[in-house]
Amino acid sequence: MTCQRVIIINEGRLVAVDTPQNLTAQLQRSQQFIVRIGGPEKEVLSEVGKINSVSRVAVKESESNGINSYLVEFKKDSDGGKDIPPVIVRKNWALYEMRPIGMSLEDIFIKLVTEEKIH
């Protein structure tokens, strides 16, 4: 995303005017991260799932070298990204990647347009 502000028009009607970041925050149910961890899959799922700010954790991709990618979804209004590294350090696992998942402009447009038709 390179734009500062987005104007979304659907069938001649103004649907939204805001920054991509604000629209994403309004439309995304909760904060989500992709986390690549080197550690036993079942134990990682269990320990990350116990974190208070986590609402859901699932394996996104398994690699043959024992490193797995997990989709971690946090409870609404939590800043859960900071809660994962201490668990990884405590368990002596390796953290290879941790990045938030945002919405593309296309995702934002589709969500706004389909919600508008429902209402």
Image: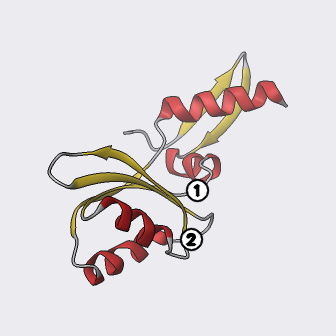
Helix, strand or loop status at disc 1: loop
Tag 2: residue type? Answer: Ser
Helix, strand or loop status at disc 2: loop
Q: Residue at x 49, y 75 (%)?
A: 51
The correct choice, above or below, for 100 with respect to 77 in the image is above
Q: CA distance from mark 1 to mark 2?
A: 8 Å
| Quarter the C terminus occupies | top right
Image coords of residue 43 (percent x, y): 36, 68
Q: Which residue is mark 2?
A: 78
| Quarter the N terminus occupies | top left
Residues at circles 1 and 2 in contact by the CB criterion of under 8 Å = yes
The correct choice, above or below, for 25 with respect to 74 in the image is above
Q: Which residue is mark 1?
A: 30
Q: Residue at x 53, y 33 (%)?
A: 107
The correct choice, above or below, for 65 with respect to 14 in the image is below
Place residue 36 in its image quadrant: bottom left
Say which label, 1 or 2, has the lower sequence index: 1
